[in-house]
Image: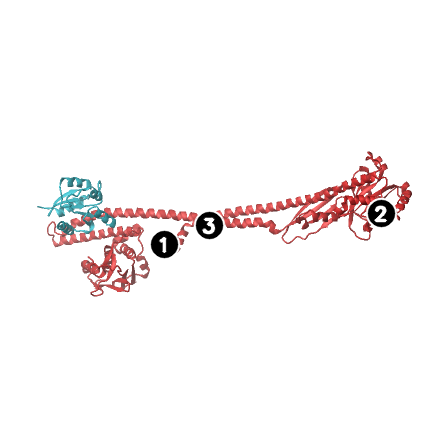
Chain colours: A red, B cyan
Amino acid sequence: MKKTVQELIKEGSRFMKVPMIVGSLVIAAGVLATYFFADFLATRSAEDFQQSTEEQITIFARNIEARTTEFEQILLLLAAFTRSMPEITQSGWSDYVAQSQVVERHEFILGIGYVDAVRADQLAQYEQDRQARQPGFRITPEGNREFYTAIRFLQPNNEVNQRAIGYDMFSESARRQAMSKARDEAKASMTTPVKLIQDEGVTDRMGVLVYYPVYASNSVPVSVEDRRAQLRGFTYIVFRPDDLIADIEETDSSEQLQSSSFVVTDTSTGLIMANQVATPAPRETQYDATRQSTIIDKQWSIALSSYQPALQRYTAPGVTFLLGIVASFAMGGFVTYLMTRRLIRLDEQHQTELQRTKDELLALTSHQLRTPASGVKQYIGMLLQGFVGALTPEQEAIAKKAFAANERQLETINQLLHVAKADADQLVLQKESLDLTTLTEQIIDSMHDDAEDHETEFILKSPKRKPVMIYADERYMRMVVENLLSNALKYSETGKPVTVTICERKEIVLLSVRDRGVGIEEADIDKLFKKFTRIPNALSKSVGGSGLGLFLAQQIMVAHGGDIEVDSKPGRGSIFTLTLPVDTTKSVTKEAV
Amino acid sequence: MKKRILVIEDDQALNDAFRLILSKDYEVDTAFDGKEALDQTDKSTYDVILLDLLMPVMDGKAFLRAFDNKHNTPIIVFSNLDAKSDIEEVSQLGASRYMLKSWASPKELLRLIEDTLSEA
């Protein structure tokens, strides 16, 4: 029998409990694994960003160091240049500095200058000498000090820088510290951030100066005393640290730095040299890094905060999570599907096996039962049919009852066998063209005695002088009609006739059997044709009569492309109606035997 | 002279029953399986053979295959098997009639044999 989709689903759901649990476990495991993996990715993404922030600050510090290290080289060269010259002129200085192109290359450098060292006893002579060459030259600030320095040249020689000419940087403590250190250690030294003379009254921005000592002797004096005694002056570079950092940011750094916040401070004074405040976008994650960096001989501390956009941070974990969830559900569904399919197959195999075993058992049992019953039929038949002489009426009555009982038994065995076949969908029909009226007349004739026993009769109503042709297996049709008629007798009230009506409507042939008996409760009507597949019940009921017969009747009618219906009212009797397609073979109609 | 019938039936009760029914009008020999029946047909010829299908040692179909029917003896298969395939198979194997055991009463059996003999 073909199953509808709904039946299949219903059937499938019967097997889906365990697969659903397993599938759910697979989904749960998948989701859990996905969660941990996504979490791992999110952590790694954060770690990666932290690491990139660290890398960024490293590059940042390295860039500052690289630029400032260059200063020392430049100052060293300038020192050597000045020492080699007995007298340096403004133009000579300008040319030399211009040749180095340092200022051109580094916009953050305000100037490269040369400072004379002047002892107190040389002051008057020095100022006089300078004024001869640089009219208006004066050492500022004024006042009596043991030791003076004076800015002699500052390239580029522009208006702003000219303000610084003559300034005694040694008079200011931050500069003095750096100058003293450079002088004593014979290497470059840098100031902490200071206010520049050039900037006085112009800006509050800080500057930083790097000094390199110039000694009178050809070689660098060994002792500190000698270095102090031989000091001729300093070459120096003045620059703005914020410009330096802006330059780094502009030229060397990644976009990340530009969107980062950072503060560069001089460690010893805590003075802020560069400060960039970036406003993080909403839901950005902040990563901090700090670095101490040695610039020339000073410690600068760099604090940097970079911000990871939420999208960047959560894209990989998010996509992973979504894909993981989808994959988990797909996997779970697939596992459920596979398991369900497997279980259904196993069940089908089991059912088939069961059906086969049942059929074999039924077939075997039926054959085994039929043989002795056939023997009984032959022996009682011999008695009844006079093979051993005439019987007394009493003997004959008894033999007849025994014969009838044996016939019923044979009938039941037959039905059992056919039920087995119908269940296995193996009803093989040997169809031929039959006149249903003739067939029914024969059956009614053969049941005449039964009808008399019930003190009733059959009334056949059918089209006169016109055969009602069907295309059917005579044996099976006989079985069905006999079954309906014997049921009708069984449930009729004595004396009330059973009406059999045969008619043809369009393409359908109808045969209805009407009894005026006890009728059937509506609730029981559906049960009438129910399959008695559960053998113990089927057997016990079939012995009584109709149950097995009606099931078989329906199977047979369906196999013929027809059906069987019942209409009944309790207490008023029942009408069983057979429907069959009309015979369309159009072959030469053959009278039913 | 009475016509000769060979009844091949493994069930003792049925075998006896057939003999009882038929022996009034015919000379009846019996066999309980195909092998025994072949021995009988080797020794004598019969006018009709009544053959069961399900039997031990050699069943009815095997008998039909093994039996060399020189005299065109009509064979009535008398069995409880009613599948179309069985009926067709034994018909091809040379059986001339097929009768369901449980459907035939003694009188019907006699009539069947009379019919068969009159046709032969």
Q: Residue at x 80, y 43 (%)?
A: A96
Residue B83: tell me if it is visible: no
Numbered mark located on residue A200 in the image: none
Q: Is residue A581 left or right of residue A374?
A: right
Q: How many marks?
A: 3
Tag 2: residue type?
A: Ile
**Among the two numbered marks 3 and 1 on one chain, the one whose residue lies closer to the N terminus:** 1
Across and down, in percent, residue A496 comes to 22, 64
Tag 3: residue type?
A: Gly
Numbered mark located on residue A333 in the image: 3
Marks 1/2: CA–CA distance: 108 Å
- Whether tag 3 and tag 1 are in contact, CB under 8 A, the answer is no
Residue A95: tell me if it is visible: yes
Across and down, in percent, residue A62 comes to 70, 43
Q: Is residue A384 left or right of residue A217?
A: left
Numbered mark located on residue A165 in the image: 2
